[in-house]
Amino acid sequence: MYADDLVRPWWEALDLDCPLFDVHTHVGTNDPSGFSATADEVRSALSLVGAEAAVFPLTEPDGYRAANDAVLREPGLVPFCRVAPGDDPAGEARRCVEAGAAGIKLHPASDEFALDDPELTGVLELAHELRLPVVVHAGPEIDPFGDTLLAVLDRFPGARFVLAHAGLTDLAWLAGHPADGLFFDTSWWSPTDLVTLFGTMPPGRVLFGSDVPYSTPTWGAHATARCTRYLGLDDTQVAGVLGGQSRRLVDRAEPLDLGPAPGHVPPLDPLLERLQVYLAAGVEATKRGESPGQMLDLARHCCRVRPGHPHRAVFESVRELLDRYEKHAPQMSTGNEYAPGWDLIATAAIVARTPGTPLPDL
């Protein structure tokens, strides 16, 4: 998927040795977004980093029963069921859990419902009763959950709610205030959001997620792990983030206490900040299927620092990623609306935002 082989050296440079569990992957071929992934594609992508994963259906306009059954039949993946109001969500969730589903996925945006929809009461009661993880889509196209989220957490304390995409739309007011029973996954591309999440939330509340097919386990594991190292998490905490905690949630075990949040995000060198801003703007263009254009030129100009700059290796590493983008993107295709090579530029943005973390010897 995407440019995994070209990104891989930056992942390998982190030299991590712990089990990986990706809490956020999809399968399906009917999503109106045009994105798709087969179970074989998910397994292949996971194999590149040796990860296990939770998997749930992409949007299915005709309902989720058949899609959930397909997920339940797939070997080598941990099945989650997807449910939505209007389609007997409580009955479907219980049916799937009894058949082996380890968790539940809710997508308030594409399935058009509120988190406190009365039809979800039975679903959340089941999650509370069995201590199930519930992955909830949390941005970018939805409004913040706000106090509704806190009310749901209070009403169903046994459930383990995982806000997807770094809890994007609610992160501003939740930062530094971890609510009981609330977790976050890292399935989001913005390095600023990820370092904010890791700096302000206890590491035991943050779970590696990739968002296949919108990203890949290689890209997601690299971004997540690099941010953990940047924030100074120790090996035990990193192992919990990358897989240990998610494994416990799907096994219905008591979550690990991995200590408090770091409580800060290190200040960024102004020259790196300039670089990261242009790279992030370039990523946003590629996510719309467009060329990064002038943003890439400006990012290259930012890399021309003097030989004695303390972060010169970071600038050189970014330049190598941009070289790889310009060399390989014209021969690549994604099969969806993303422009080829988007993940190379996104990797460059992560590297620019996390100075001091290990880099490949190129």
Image (cartoon, grey):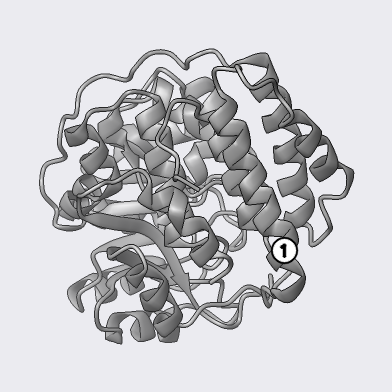
Q: Amino acid at mark 1?
A: Lys
Secondary structure type for disc 1: helix
Q: What residue is drawn where x is 54% and y is 68%?
A: 213
Question: Residue 248: image x %, image y %?
Answer: 16, 50
Instruction: Work out which residue is located at the far front of the displayed protein and give it.
Output: 307
Question: Which residue is painted at 28% across and 41% down in the image?
Answer: 241
> For residue 314, which quarter of the picture?
top right
- Residue at image point 25% right, 33% down: 204
Of residues 201 and 121, the one drawn nearer to the viewer in this rendering: 201
Q: Is residue 68 left or right of residue 108?
A: left
> Can residue 340 be seen by looking at this rendering?
no
Total marks shown come to 1
Rendered position, 293 above or below 271: below
The image shows residue 276, relative to residue 248, as above or below, that is above
Q: Quadrant of residue 50?
A: bottom left
Return the residue at label 1: 327
Looking at the image, residue 340 lies above or below residue 15: below
Give the percent coordinates (x, y) of residue 244: 19, 47
- Closest to the observer, 90 or 164: 164
